[in-house]
Amino acid sequence: MDMQAFFKLSYGLYIISARWEERDYGCVVNTLQQVTAEPPMLSVAVNKNSVTAKAILSSGHFCGVVLTEKADLALIGPFGFQNSEAVDKFASFSTARDQNGARYLTERAAARYSCAVTGTLDLDTHLLIVGRVEEAEILSDDPVMTYDYYHRVVKGGTPPTAPSYKGEAKAEAKPDAPARWRCKICGYIYEGDPLPADFICPICKKPADQFEKI
């Protein structure tokens, strides 16, 4: 089976959030989609071990935000590679709360949807969560982020817990291109040679020994 064939499927990039026991949870996904128009329903696949998934199931609600092309690794990184119980992922960004108290981004976001959970489907490593949309709002008219744009332009990686994770395709080397180093944890790209021994990844805060030359 050629796993690279899955890169031909089109996705967006979204932040899913929930609030439970006075704590805000959130994570990046590329699996939010509309499943019916009447009633308006959305589904999202979230890793079973994600604390955000547990918060969604416990609260019975979730909020989904569509990211725009203005979203960079400084925004995407914390939501994709850090734990909501260890850090406040929303602290550095402009946010608001929906009618259920879920916190969501108001910057670098095209739209948001607030949903009440109506059902789940066990997908082994992930849960498919279905929700009825209770609120929907356009936040900006900026172009929306696609998963292809995220990989090609933003140069981001995929967390191993993501439902779409299948390893990264290796780009063909260009003779005159500068040396590039990729963080094995979050996918951040450093350009230059050599990689400084004391370099710290600006996204996941891992040291230089967690980088690989690509």
Image: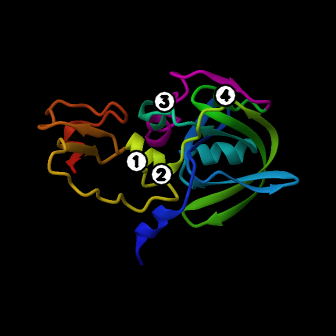
Residue 29 locus on image (x, y percent): 56, 48
Which of 78/68 is in front? 68
- Asked if the magenta segment contains residue 79, the reply would be yes
Structural distance between the alpha carbons of marks 1 and 3: 28 Å
Secondary structure beneath disc 2? helix
> What residue is shown with label 4?
22
> Is residue 200 in sight in this rendering?
yes
Within 10 Å of disc 1 (Cα), the crowding (few <14, some 14-19, many 20+) is: few
* Label at residue 87: 3
Direction from residue 81 to residue 112 in the image, left or right: right
Q: Which residues are magenta?
A: 77-99
Query: Mark 3 or mark 2, which is nearer the start of the sequence?
Result: 3
Total numbered circles: 4
> What's the CA distance linking mark 4 and mark 2?
35 Å
Residues at badges 2 and 1 in contact (C-beta under 8 Å)? Answer: yes
Answer few, some or many: residues within 10 Å of disc 2's Cα (few below 14, many 20 plus, some between 14 and 19).
some
Q: Amino acid at mark 2?
A: Asp
The residue at 60%/33% (across/down) is: 142
Q: Amino acid at mark 3?
A: Val
| Colouring style | rainbow
> Which element carries disc 3, helix, strand or loop?
loop
Say which of marks 4 and 2 sits in front: 2
Q: Nearer the viewer, mark 1 or mark 3?
A: 1
Q: Nearer the viewer, mark 1 or mark 4?
A: 1
